[in-house]
Amino acid sequence: MHDLNFRDPSFTWHRGEIFERLDIAIGNRAWLNEFPRTIVTHLPTLKSDHKPLLLSIRPELRISKECPFRFLTRWLEHLRFPDFVKDQWGFHGNLALLSNLFSMMIPKGLCGEIERIVKQFIWGSSKGSLEYVVEGIVRRIVSIPLPHPSVGHDKEPQKVRFFLWLVLNQKLLTNTEHVKKGIGYDSSCDICGNHSKDILHVTRDCLVAKEIWMLALPNGISGCFFVGDLIQWLKGVHEIQYAVVTGANKVVGLEICKQLAQDGIMVVLTARDEKRGLEALESLKYSVLSDYLIFHQFDVADLESIVSLTDFVKKQFGKLDFLVNNVGILGATFSIAPDTKVNSHDIWSKATDDKYELAEECLKMNYYGAKRTAEALNPLLQLSDLPRIVNVSSSKGKGEKLKGVLTGVTTDEKLNDLITEYLKDFKEGLHGSKGWPTFISAYTVSKVALNAYTRILANKYPDFCINSVCPVYAKTDINLNTGTITAEEGAVTPVKLALLPKGSPSGLFFVNGKPATPEP
């Protein structure tokens, strides 16, 4: 090994009257043969009394700007890291933006992909032991035996669980963060009670934290490591999955995006209104979820927009694992004065749906939009190991005519014919006399048709997992936010269906998390 050449300064660290060179750069003969002009120098100090080290294999490219930059392993886990470096690393080497962006990221602990399952073990375990928690996590996620199966029962499992919960929910507070939040200063670690509570300690060096990481890491990873090592290992055995959610800029749609992102899925949040879609994304800018969410403008009623979204997904990801068709409009108007307080019992008496244009648009969005989106993205879904489609629908549907739609139609061609027949009857004012619903008519027909299409599509693609779901009466714009459950609660079953494992039921309609048949 050979000491590489330094180009000033003589000392890289000082405190008071003490000056030292604390760094040494060494390389083997192969390196020197490959890069004979290698020069090592130091960058200006920044927020520290130590100068960052800079190794240059092309010394003629002199650094003319400050490079306040220290590489942190966890940056590699940021999904935009490679592209960001490519864009920012110019001849001037100005990486200030990179430092500002990524240094704010606390290591994420276990990746979002396993957060939901880990929480289940943390709060739902009946055995109450660290062995059960860690072994269960690894077994459920990677389906391989735990590298270190033997764990003692004297490790204060409740404290371990609490630590895991803190990591997963980004609630580990260092002394600096305590001061910023105005909640006092504590020089000792809340977890082990022994050491100073700095960021490296609480995420890596804490005795309890180290115990957890060493138990969960495979045998090949040892020594000094960052939490990112575990994430990278999991990514190595779990390919990143991709989802598209339509109508996702607010309420249930946005909550579906958030919950999928919490499972480590890259989600394309779509909305017809670009401004509102970007605002929805901006609302998550400073959360961990922002790394797993991107926006794309999308109108399900516009064929060019469907082609644009398909091309975007193909170029960005090369495949698609999940499609959640969440777009839905009521196809009716409310005769309610602005700012009038209403409840779920009386708003529907004020609904008016006698305009053909509204009915036509409702079918175009709720049924044909979901159908055409699924058809366009189908080739990308077929590239997934387990493609899943979730159609957010409704349990609305009454009358013999709708019973026939649900049970007697076996092809989407026949279903399209029925929709055409309905619109003709509606336009002529005959839909009531011919057995079609008269209350919120177009919305009811569109959702029942979507349920039927779900079953048809599931039969056509047996390797897919395709289901429809009623999010119960969640608060949405459609019901003027008079729903009885929150958007978060309404998103639970759609997300559950999206995450169903291989071999799960397909072609069913779900209400309250269970298969159901819409009321005739």
Image (tube, helix red, strand yellow):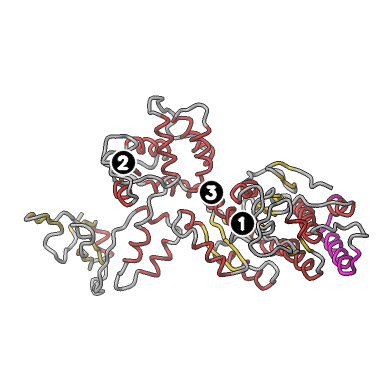
Q: Position of residue 125 (x, y in %)?
A: 52, 31
The nearer-to-camera label among 1 and 3 is 1
| Residue receiving disc 3 | 263
Q: Nearer the viewer, residue 321 or 436?
A: 436
Q: Please tell me which residue is depicted at 60% across the width and 56% down the height of the picture.
A: 251
254 relative to 120, above or below: below
- Label 3 packing within 10 angstroms: few (<14), some (14-19), many (20+): many
The x and y percentages for residue 334 are 73, 63
Question: Dot 1 surroundings within 10 Å: few (below 14), some, or many (20 or more)?
Answer: many
Disc 2 designates what residue?
A: 205
Q: Residue 154: horizontal and vertical position, in percent?
A: 38, 25
Q: Quadrant of residue 355?
A: bottom right
Q: Give left or right: position of 63 versus 159.
A: left
**SS class, disc 3:** loop
The numbered mark at residue 482 is none
In the rendered image, the vertical position of residue 192 relative to residue 267, given as above or below = above
In terms of secondary structure, where does tag 2 sit? helix
Please name the amino acid that badge 3 sits on: Asp
